[in-house]
Structure formats: structure tokens, C-alpha cells
Image: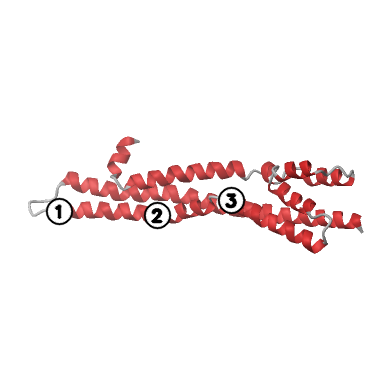
Amino acid sequence: MFPIIQAAGWPIWFLLAASVIALALIIERLLALRRTKVLPMRLLEDVLGLYRAKQITPEVVDRLEGNSPLGRVLAAGLRNERASRELMKESIEEAGRAAAHEMERFLNALGTIAVTAPLMGLFGTVIGMIEIFGAQAPAGTSPVALAHGISVALYNTAFALVVAIPSLIFYRHFRSRIDDFVAEMEQQAVRFVDVVHGERE
């Protein structure tokens, strides 16, 4: 691996740094955006069961808020259970926006890497081309300098694609997963509001 890095020249270090950051972000988001962490199974049913049994206390609401993004949305509704339906829905929507923002954390950084990695590769390619032209001399072309310039250009181009393609794939995958989670949270929140206000009426 080190001989390849040497052959690719100093521009490759920018791409190596980007690849390490992208890998860390992908792993972090894969762990954070698991369904069990965002939308725990039967959480809504458990909360409604406690609500019907009149076992909702401030401590239960605090624990629910720290449970998951869905828990935060339901906790916002419980804190406004005595308010009008519109006010309750508004508080739930606010909590939902905050939860969605939290789920989107680091996605902009991953998307930026996906977009800029090819530009970094192009920069390395340009550096390689400059070295190739620099190898041209009145006395003749230096084969070593020529080969080094070509390797810098090709390695940087290839490595840039290796970084950019997975970054873009995971960026779009995470965006789609978050959209699905938000839609499902909205459905569960609407059901929660209907049950709470239906029982009050």
C-alpha cells in the first residue's frame, strides 16, 4: 500500500484524509440510523398503554424523551396532552423537525466529500500532467520522471473515484432512510394525537 501512496505523490494525502473521514461518518450513521434506535418496536403501544392506565409521570416523559427520536416526538405530545389538538400537533411537529435535523447530522459532510473527492482527484491528475510536461527537456525525456507523472495522474484519478462513489451511495441511502423514518414518525404521531384526543372527547 505504501509504494502506491509513494507513486501517487503528495496530492493523494488529501484523498486519504477524505477517505478516513468518509468511512468514520458512514460507520457512525449506520449505527445511529438503525430502526431499533430511531423507531423502537411497540414504543407507541407501550406509551398508549401507560397513558390509558394513567401512569404518565414527569419522570416517564423524561425517560421517553431520551429513548429515541420517536420517543422525543411522543414526549412532546404528552407534555401538551391537555392543550388543544392544534397546539399538541404543533409541538409534535416541532419535536419531529428537531429529530429529523439530528438524524441528518454529518450527512452534509458526507455529501461534500462525495462531491469534492473527484475534484481532489482532478487536482492530482493536473499535478501529474505538470510533472509529465516537466519531464520534457532539450536533452530528452526522463523515463523515470515521465513514469512518475503518469502514476500520479492515474492513481489520484482512480482513488478519487474509490472515495467518491461509496460516499455518494451512502449519502443517498441515508437520505432515503431518514425520509422513510420521518414519514413513519408522522404516521405514529397522528395516531397518538387521535387516540389522546379521542379518549378525551
Give the residue at mark 3. Answer: 174
Q: Residue furthest top?
A: 2
State if disc 2 and disc 3 touch (CB < 8 Å).
Answer: no
Q: Is residue 60 left or right of residue 139?
A: right
Seen in the picture, residue 49 relative to 93 is either above or below; the reply is: above
Q: Secondary structure at mark 1?
A: loop
Q: Say which amino acid is labelled 3.
A: Phe
Q: Secondary structure at mark 3?
A: helix
- The mark that comes first in sequence, 3 or 2, is 2
Q: Say which amino acid is labelled 2.
A: Pro
Image quadrant occupied by the N terminus: top left
Q: Name the foreground residue: 50 vs 119.
A: 50
Give the residue at mark 1. Answer: 136
Q: Nearer the viewer, mark 1 or mark 3?
A: 3
Q: Secondary structure at mark 2?
A: helix
Q: Name the foreground residue: 162 vs 96.
A: 96
Image quadrant occupied by the C terminus: bottom right
Whole-percent x, y for residue 102 in the image: 61, 51
Whole-percent x, y for residue 33 in the image: 62, 45
